[in-house]
Amino acid sequence: MAKCKRFLMSYLNEVRSTEVANGYKEDIDTALLKLYAEADHDSLLDLLVTENSCLLTDSAAWLEKHKKYFALGLLYHYNNQDAAAVQLWVNIVNGDIHDSTRSDLYEYVIDFLTYSSDQELVWKYADWALQKSEEVGVQVFTKRHLEEEQNSFNPDDILTCLKKYPDALVKYLEHLVMDRKLQREEYHTHLAVLYLDKVLQQRPSADSMGTEVTEAQAKLRHLLQKSDVYRVRFLMEKVQGASLPMERAILHGKLEEHEKALRILVHELRDIPAAEDYCLWRSEGRDPAYRQQLFHTLLTLYLSPSSSAPELAVAAVDLLNHHAAEFDAAQVLPLLPGSWSVQLLCPFLTGAMRDSVHTRRTAQVALGLAKSENLIYKYDKMRLKGSSFRLSDKNLCQTCQNPFCEPVFVRYPNGGLVHTHCAASRHMDPSSPRPGART
């Protein structure tokens, strides 16, 4: 009997796509489904995910009889009954019914909902998906096709839904801010506050100054640096007294309070590389004078009388020698201690001298070019003044076509002659006839 059924399965599978099946497609596919389900054959799923003519009522009863619930869900989906399909799969995941066809059925349902255009269906199972796993469940919103997400799901509605799921809320805000790059202040500020709350939860003591940067803290710093739309003063109030000096420095920078920021980096954190990186970060895209002022502020902090630490003197020397182009030597030299040798600052002085020579030579070239251009203009002026022509009563104004009654006129470079008032009206009204055009 088993051999006969295998032969029948093979035969039906062969003829279902030929002319022999014309008029019998429903009977053939339904029979094939029943044989596959009864034999627990792998081709059952292939049949249901491709074009088929299985009779819904007959096939559904047979699949339920043989406990092929996942396959039954596929049959419902093929017949546009997604709600019934998802409910069946949810029952399997919850353990209400048993079907071991897919061990990753929860992830399959999440993908199914992600690509579903039925908003009502997605909202119905959103809480179920998030309760199972916030990280995976939120994908029904974050992995949705961008065009569909923009046209169907309102981000504010999703955020309201996610209030009960803090991890999912962070993931979705990251999606809005990092992936979709929405420039809305409330999204950026909300995400920064959530990062900050997580950082503070991971630091139970307000006096603990751990040097290890957590993932949440790294994300917070990145957001504070890269975003320009969050509420800076609001976040500054939250980090005050929270033992987060690096975050305070970044926020001071956003407020253009550079001396405060650099003082934190230099005196509180003693982080010399971070102070130099700060100057590069805040001067990115700004004019050279702004960049020079930042580096000069940092140098002043290194050399201030209250900064007697030897490492700050070394930092000042390194700063000058490695960033010579960022300083005005005339402003720097009066600040330097008299005990410093020329050899100590050789790279800085060499760079300053090179920049000075380059600036002077560039100015000389610019001056020479300006003089050459001036000579060209003088030559053109002399050439025009040296030419002559005769004005008679036969000459007509090329604008109004009237003769000249007075010896006062305007001559254009092309030789055209016009009355002074015609030339003035032409400049005031661009739509007036040009010289040579007849009215």
Image (cartoon, rainbow, N blue to C red):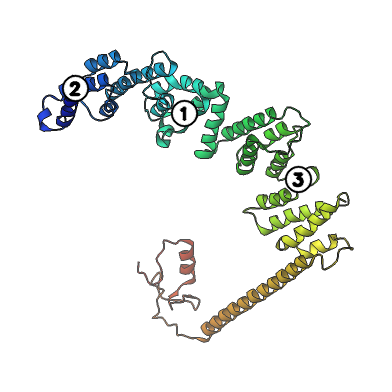
**Left or right relative to 439: residue 310:** right
**CA gap, disc 1 to disc 2?**
53 Å
Dot 3: what SS? helix
**Left or right relative to 291: residue 387:** left
Task: Name the mark on residue 154.
Answer: 1
* Amino acid carrying mark 3 in the image: Leu
Q: Which residue is found at the position 48% from the left and 26% from the top? A: 137
Q: Which residue is found at the position 40% from the left and 16% from the top? A: 91
Q: Position of residue 383 (x, y in %)?
A: 52, 84
Q: Which residue is mark 3?
A: 265
Q: Nearer the viewer, mark 3 or mark 1?
A: 3
**Left or right relative to 161: residue 98:** left
Q: Position of residue 263 (x, y in %)?
A: 78, 46
Q: Position of residue 314 (x, y in %)?
A: 81, 56
Picture quadrant of residue 2: top left
**Mark 1 or mark 3, which is nearer the start of the sequence?**
1
Q: Nearer the viewer, mark 2 or mark 3?
A: 2
Q: Is residue 227 visible?
A: yes
* Amino acid carrying mark 2 in the image: Lys
Q: Which residue is mark 2?
A: 5
**Mark 3 or mark 2, which is nearer the start of the sequence?**
2
* Amino acid carrying mark 1 in the image: Asn
Dot 1: what SS? loop
